[in-house]
Image (cartoon, helix red, strand yellow):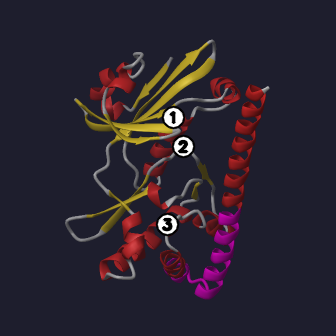
């Protein structure tokens, strides 16, 4: 078992250690998301904390993460610290916990401060109808440019992984979440930037508007950036649909095979 706690959150140590107790995570907290990974919120002596559980790993991944690669929880923790060092908003990294069995990673948890910011998706869906929506996307384009200028590629730059809020002075502020899949470079080419932005799963009008504002702030040709970005996004979406189709076809073939063997 490995437990690492941010020195700034010593008050959370007892809670963090309790995550290693069998059944504690499953039977406590309030669930925010329950899918391949599970996210819950807990009220602790260190305040409201969000805990992401990375579970249900295939055997191969359990071996790899137990020996050759950092776990997703450790990467999420280290990347969040790195983002803050670069001046990029993200909820405070509190701790990570790894539980191993027979030398293989069984389960891991990433603990962070629970953000009070809002999901950015609604702003992308209504920006054309309200001035505030457009203002938020203007600020979002500046934020994404700052992220890329710092050499950061968030490899799951889904719009749902971006949060926003408004400071008392009226300035928009943003945070990145789901930080385990990231790469850090000294500088990024325009192609790498657009390849990253194509992952923004927002309505097309909002996506093109973000590209336009991004290009203007980088003194790039807006039409060329929008055209290349639109093509890259289209190709990305086509590949995603193909993957889903293949997965669905494989599931159907397996289920039909099982039915066939049972009939025999």
Kindly tell me whether residue 132 is visible in this rendering: yes
Q: Is residue 90 magenta?
A: no
Does dot 3 land on a helix, a strand or a loop? helix
Kindly tell me whether residue 139 is visible in this rendering: no
Residue in the image at 35% along x and 82% along y: 129
Q: Disc 2 versus disc 3: distance between alpha carbons?
A: 18 Å
Q: Nearer the viewer, mark 3 or mark 1?
A: 1
Which residue, given by chain and number where applicable, does mark 2 sit on?
180
**Eyeballing the image, is 154 above or below 259?**
below
Residue in the image at 65% along x and 82% along y: 227
Are dots 1 and 2 in contact, CB under 8 Å? yes
**Residue 77 percent coordinates (x, y):** 47, 38
Residue in the image at 40% along x and 16% along y: 21
* Magenta segment: 213-238
Which residue, given by chain and number where applicable, does mark 1 sit on?
73
- 201 relative position to 259: left or right: left
Ranked by sequence position, the earlier of labels 2 and 3 is: 3
**Residue 253 percent coordinates (x, y):** 75, 42
Q: Main secondary structure of the magenta part?
A: helix
**Residue 144 percent coordinates (x, y):** 49, 66
């Amino acid at each position: 078992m490995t437990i690492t706690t941010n020195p700034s959150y010593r008050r959370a140590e007892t809670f963090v250690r309790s995550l290693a107790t069998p059944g504690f995570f499953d039977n406590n907290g309030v669930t925010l998301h329950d899918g391949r990974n599970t996210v819950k919120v807990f009220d602790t002596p260190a305040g409201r904390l969000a805990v992401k559980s990375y579970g249900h790993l295939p055997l191969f991944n359990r071996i790899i993460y137990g020996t050759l690669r950092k776990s997703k929880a450790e990467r999420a923790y280290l990347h969040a610290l790195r983002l803050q060092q670069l001046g990029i908003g993200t909820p405070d990294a509190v701790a990570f916990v790894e539980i191993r069995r027979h030398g293989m990673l069984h389960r891991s948890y990433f603990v962070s401060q629970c953000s009070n910011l809002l999901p950015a998706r609604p702003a992308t869906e209504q920006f054309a109808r309200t001035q505030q929506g457009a203002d938020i996307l203007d600020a979002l384009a500046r934020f994404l440019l700052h992220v890329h200028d710092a050499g950061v590629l968030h490899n799951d730059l889904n719009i749902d992984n971006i949060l926003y809020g408004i400071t008392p002075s009226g300035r928009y502020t943003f945070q990145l979440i789901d930080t385990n899949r990231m790469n850090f470079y000294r500088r990024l080419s325009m192609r790498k930037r657009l390849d990253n932005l194509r992952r923004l799963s927002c309505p097309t009008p909002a996506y093109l508007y973000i590209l336009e504002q991004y290009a203007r702030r980088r003194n790039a040709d807006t039409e060329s950036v929008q055209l290349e970005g639109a093509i890259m996004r289209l190709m990305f979406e086509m590949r995603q649909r193909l993957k889903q189709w293949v997965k669905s076809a494989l599931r159907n073939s397996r289920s039909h095979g099982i039915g066939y063997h049972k009939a025999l």
